[in-house]
Amino acid sequence: GISPTAESFLDLLRSVSVDLNHDTSLLIDIPDALCERDKVKFTVHTKTTLSSFQKPDFSVPRQHEDFIWLHDTLVETEEYAGLIIPPAPPKPDFEGPREKMHKLGEGEATMTKEEYTKMKQELEAEYLAVFKKTVQVHEIFLQRLSSHPILSKDRNFQIFLEYDQDVSCKEKECKGNVWRFLQNMVKSADEFLISGVKQEKTFLLDYYSKIKDSTAKAEKMTRSHQNIAEDYIRISSTLNSISADDSTANKKHLEKLSDLFEKLRKVEGRVASDQELKLTELLRYYMRDIQAAKDLLYRRARSLADYENSNKALDKARLKGKDVPQAEENQQHCLQKFDKLSESGKKELTNFKGRRVMAFRKNLIEMAELEIKHAKNNATLLQGCIDLINNN
Amino acid sequence: MFHGQISTSVSSEGRKSHNPLSFMSNGRNPLTTVEGLYFLNICRLILLDLIVVNLLTPTLTEHIFSSLALPKSKSLFFFFFKLSNEARTPLILPSLLLQTSLSVFRLQDFSVKRRFSDFLGLHSKLASKYLHIGCIVPPAPRRALWVRVKVGKEDQSSNEFVEKRRCALERYLMRTVKHPVLLKDPDLLQFLESPELARAVSTQALSGAGLMRMMNKAADAVNKMTIRMNESDTWFEEKQQHFENLDLQLRKLHGSIESLVCHRKELSLNTCQFARSAAMLGNSEDHTALSRALSQLAEVEEKMEALHNEQANQDFSLLSELVGDYVRLLSAIKAVFEHRVKTWQKWQDTQILLQKKREAEAKLQITNKPDKLQQAKDEIKELELKVSQGERDFEQISKTIRKEVTRFEKERVKDFKETIVKYLETLLHSQQQMIKYWEAFLPEAKAIS
């Protein structure tokens, strides 16, 4: 079966992003995935009642790069400039647990078999947790798209879901374009951010840096909890060895203490993973989401710049008396684009705020409840051990 | 101030017996006796390198009285050390407090000042007197080489250092005084009561660590000798093996606990940093209720930081120090076992010498050298005495060690049980606080709309 830590991850990012998958006309999930060395192969399964798809129920294999391709393609699409494109799922990162496995292998000689087995179990659970996390993040990304009124109808999205040949050939060229595109955005957008969109942008920039900092600090807290859990394993194991060799009344005391530390470390491990889930993942997700919102503002700022340029061009044209109708048309076009972006942008940002507040509420409540649960658990274990030792 | 009389079985010779309670046995008001004044004389001299310790041990009193054969019900005896941060240097003020059921102690404040090096000096004296006869002399705390207490500075780290030292000295003194043989030692009694103590010379060499090194070297030297002892008593073999294993395990445990202390301190620090970050995030948040909730979260995490820090201190002072003390005690036990081997060796050597002399004498019997023969006979007589003395010594030390080890194991059980329970109670308290804090936060989180 699945270890308790992994099971709790099944609840993962569903809690982070709310209001998904209400519309049953297009249902997407990732029912399983394979991990080969560095590559993760996701099985993307689609169930749909829409006629735009060839089949009502089908699955395709996809890799991480394919998701990135889809994301970047959507970002690049001019029509969606006024939308918050859901943030791309982060690359699967098994470096952490893999490095620890390596270290454990090297240090095998210095610990008892029991200790080694326990630490290996912990690491395997961690590995599995990372795996589950990455599956969920990719799934959420697709579900955000499928529940969006406009993005769900995107042709590229459909290709991604349906095309059963290799899509990754598109990847490399798109990547380069998008990167250059964004770079340009940053350069020109910054100047225009002073005018007009300052308030929203300042808020997001400030919030982004703060949330990024909080994410990093939360990660460190989790790391410390994991370290303590590991110390408890070693202490428990050594106490066990000492008690085995003891023939006095100490034996029972040490056995009980050893047993207690073993139980405490499990709780400590859950504290760490729950904190990760409810706090750190929440912060991480919204950090990425804010980045996506920022991108929207960049695009809006750029369209404003385009509009202002078109105005200048029109004036010039009128002065020279040449190409006035084209200039007028261009100006109108830019104005419309800017208006459209502003309108949909406002809606998106309002939804974004609502989503964020609800997600924080849900996760903070759940985190507090879990902390209470674990502390109560610990208290019971401790009181039990104290009573046992005292009554001996 | 007397509410009654004290009757003890201590000799009424008063001054003659070197018993700190002797002046009380004649029923007079202690304040008027010379010894009483002697005790009252609190030295106001301020000396460098002194540390103040604070200690109150009711359990100790019981033990001391059973050793001195005084009726428990009649008197209480405290060792009391007063902590003082006055003046520019930290001071040691161990105070001997005598309290009878007559509650006289409030008037009398017997205190003597001792330097850290005095404790080391005491230990070296006791070790030199009692280790070789098989008594497990508790090792003194080590001199921490890395910190010099800064004179006049009231910072966190120097306070922590003073406190750690105080606790270590307290535990050391308690263990020493609990030992029935050591308690009767005149050097120990002088240490406890004499207002001024001759400064221990060259305590560098006598520092706890130094002494450990010496003992370990002696132990190694014995091991390196090719002559192995014929162990006729399996008890010793088993015990030695047991202690060697225990030593390894305890060192390992100590390492893991030190790691735990370190990680918990890190957790405290990381929690503090997160709390600050969350507070800033709360400030940036424009949704009012969420902003408030984030600020509250920051406050909870600040409280958690304090909890974690406190717990790390308990991890250290209760768990780590306990295991550390026992690692050092095991070194003393090792030394004592080695002394037994040395004693056996000495006995064997004397026997071999006797044998040689007997052979020589036999040869001399044939030759006609009456002087040399007589000399040989005398030497043989002397050696025969030495041999039986050697045998007695060996039997004595073996007997003593058995008693000592039994006492040690009994003490260990009590010590461990007490400390473990104390430690678990700190963990329990910590968790209960956490429950309180998070339960207070929950409504704040729910209030977000």
Image: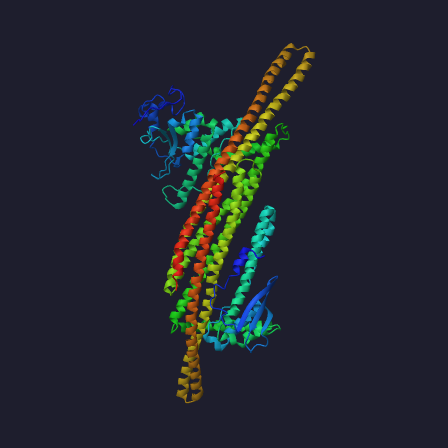
Q: How many marks?
A: 0
Residue B93, compared with residue A71, is above or below; it is above
Q: Residue at x 57, y 50 (%)?
A: A118
Q: Work out whether residue B416 can be spotted.
A: yes
Residue placed furthest toward the bottom: A321
* Rendered location of residue A2, percent (x, y): 57, 57
| Colour option used | rainbow
Q: Which is more toward the observer, A356 or B444? A: B444
A389 vs B57, left or right, is right
* Rendered location of residue A203, percent (x, y): 39, 67
Q: Which is more toward the observer, A37 or A127? A: A127
* Image quadrant occupied by the C terminus of chain B: bottom left
* Image quadrant occupied by the N terminus of chain B: top left
B333 vs B359, left or right, is left
Q: Residue at x 61, y 63 (%)?
A: A34
* Rendered location of residue B283, percent (x, y): 37, 62
Residue B238, compared with residue A154, is above or below; it is above
Q: Which is more toward the observer, A360 or B322? A: A360
* Rendered location of residue A107, percent (x, y): 59, 49
Residue B414, compared with residue A274, is above or below; it is above
Residue B241, compared with residue A353, is above or below; it is above
Residue placed furthest toward the right: B366
Q: Work out whether residue A93 can be spotted.
A: no
